[in-house]
Amino acid sequence: MTTLALSMIVRDAAAFLGACLESVQPVVNEIYIADTGSTDDTVQIAKRFGARVSSIPWTNNFAEARNRALQDITTDWVLSLDADEQLDTQAPRQIRELLAKGSAAGFAVTIRNYVLSLDERVWDRAATPNDGLLPSAAKYPAFVEHENIRLFRRDPRIYFVGRVHESVGPRIQDLNQKISPANFFIHHFGLASDAETRARKNNFYRELGRQKIREMPDKAQAYLELGIVELDNFRNFPEALALFQRACELNPRLGVAWFFTGVTLVKLRRFFDALDALLHAEKYGHGTALVAETRADALYNLNRVAEACKSYSLALRRDPASLSLQSKLALAEVRSGQAVPGLERLRRALRKSPTAAELHDRLILALVSLNRLSEAATAAEQKLSSIPHPEAKDFLRAASLCQKAGRSDRCAALLQNGLLAFPEHALLRQALRELASGSAPATPHPATSLDH
C-alpha cells in the first residue's frame, strides 16, 4: 500500500492547527510536526490528532527547519502544509488518485490564498472573486492562486532549498525528475490575518530576505523576492525599485522583474518610465493580464484614456473573469465619453460582487466625473450598506456628496452614523460641526487617479 505522511513546522499555531489537521486525517497515514518554540497549545493540539511532535531550534532558515521535519519520515510520499492551510474537502480522494498513478517525483499544487479585496495581488497574480468552493472561507471576497510543490516522493535527494520562499522544486529539477500538476486545492488563510500578525510576519520576511541576498548576492530571484516585500508590505517604493532594477541587471530576461519595476514606477508616478519597463516585461515573455492592466493604469493617469481602454480590453482578454478589470475599463470608458456602456459595465460588475468596495468606489468616481452628484451620493450610500466593514472615509464621502447634491438632512445622518461606528474620529466630528454651523463639510471625494 502506498503511504503518505504530513510534514509540518509550526510555532504558536493553536488558532489554525486543529482545522488543518482535521482536513488531512482522511488521507495521511502519519503526521510529523516539528515545533520551533510554541508557547500556546500547539503541541497539545497536535498530539490530540496523533501527531509525532519534536522540538527543533529555529535558525532563521525555513528550508533547514523543513528538512529537519523530514528526517524521521519513512512513508512513500510527503505532503507539506503550513498550520494556516487546509486541504480542500475533495482533496483526500484526489490525492489517492494521484498516488495510485505515481508517475512523478512531485506535484505542483494550486494554493488559494484568501484576501480582503478584489484589488489585491499576490506577487504577479491577480485576485479572483471567491467562488465558495470552501464554505468556511465564504467571508473572504476573493482569493489569489499560485502553485507550489507540496506533494512529493520521500527521497533523501529531495529536500527544501532556500532560507525563505523555500521549495523542493530545485532539487527535483536538478535530479531531472518529473513535476506534474496536482488535481487538488490547498486553502490558505494567512494573508487575511489581522493587521498585527501581518505586520509581524512582514518584518520577519524582510529580515530573511536581506539575509538571503547576503548569501546569494548574484541571484536575481533573491532581489526580486525582497523587492516584493518592500513594495507590497512596506510601500517602500524607492528601495523596491532599486531591488527590482538590480534583478533586471542580473537577469535582463527575467520578465517578472521588469513587471514589478513597472508596478513600482506607477506607484512613484513615473508613468512614462513604467510604460518602458512594461514593454520589457512583454518582450521577455511576461505577457500577463496584470502587465496589460498596469500599462493601462499608467496610460489612464497620463490622461490617455482611449489608449487605456485598449490596454484594459487586452487585459480582460487575458483574464475575462476579472471584475476589477471590468470596473477599470468601465471607468476609462466613462472618461473617454462612453458613459452609457461604461456605467452599465460597472453596474454589472457590482451585481456580481456587491460587497467589493473597490467596485463601488469606481462607480462613485464615474458618476462624479459626469457631474451626476445625486446618483453619486446614492451610490456612496449603497456602498455603506453593501460592504462588510465601511471605513470612516466612506461615511465622509457619502456625506459630502449628499451635501453637494442638496440633501443636507442625509449628510447629517451619515456623519452621525459614522460617529457611532468611529466615535473618536476627528474629521467626522469636524464635518458635523461645520454642517451645524452652516458651512459645507470639507470631506473627501474619490481620487481621480488609478493606482495599481
Image: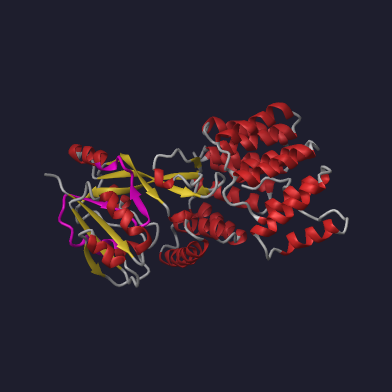
In front here: 169 or 245? 169
Taking the spot 64% from the left edge, 34% from the top edge, the residue there is 329
Where's residue 292, x and y in %?
Answer: 58, 38
> Was residue 88 drawn as part of the magenta stretch in this picture?
yes
Specify the quadrant of the image occupied by residue 56. Answer: bottom left
Residue at the limit of the structure toward the left, as seen here: 1
In front here: 310 or 257? 310
Where's residue 107, x and y in %?
Answer: 29, 43
Where's residue 191, x and y in %?
Answer: 47, 54
**Which of the colour schemes (rainbow, by chain, secondary structure, one colour) is used?**
secondary structure
Taking the spot 59% from the left edge, 39% from the top edge, the residue there is 293
Is 92 displayed left or right of 231 in the figure? Answer: left
In front here: 158 or 215? 158
Give the quadrant of the N terminus.
top left
In front here: 84 or 173? 84
Look at the image and tell me whether residue 106 can be seen. yes
Residue stretch in magenta: 66-92
Taking the spot 82% from the left edge, 48% from the top edge, the residue there is 408
Where's residue 355, x and y in %?
Answer: 57, 43
Is 202 displayed left or right of 110 in the figure? Answer: right
In the rendered view, would you say 334 is above or below 241?
above
> Was residue 395 drawn as part of the magenta stretch in this picture?
no
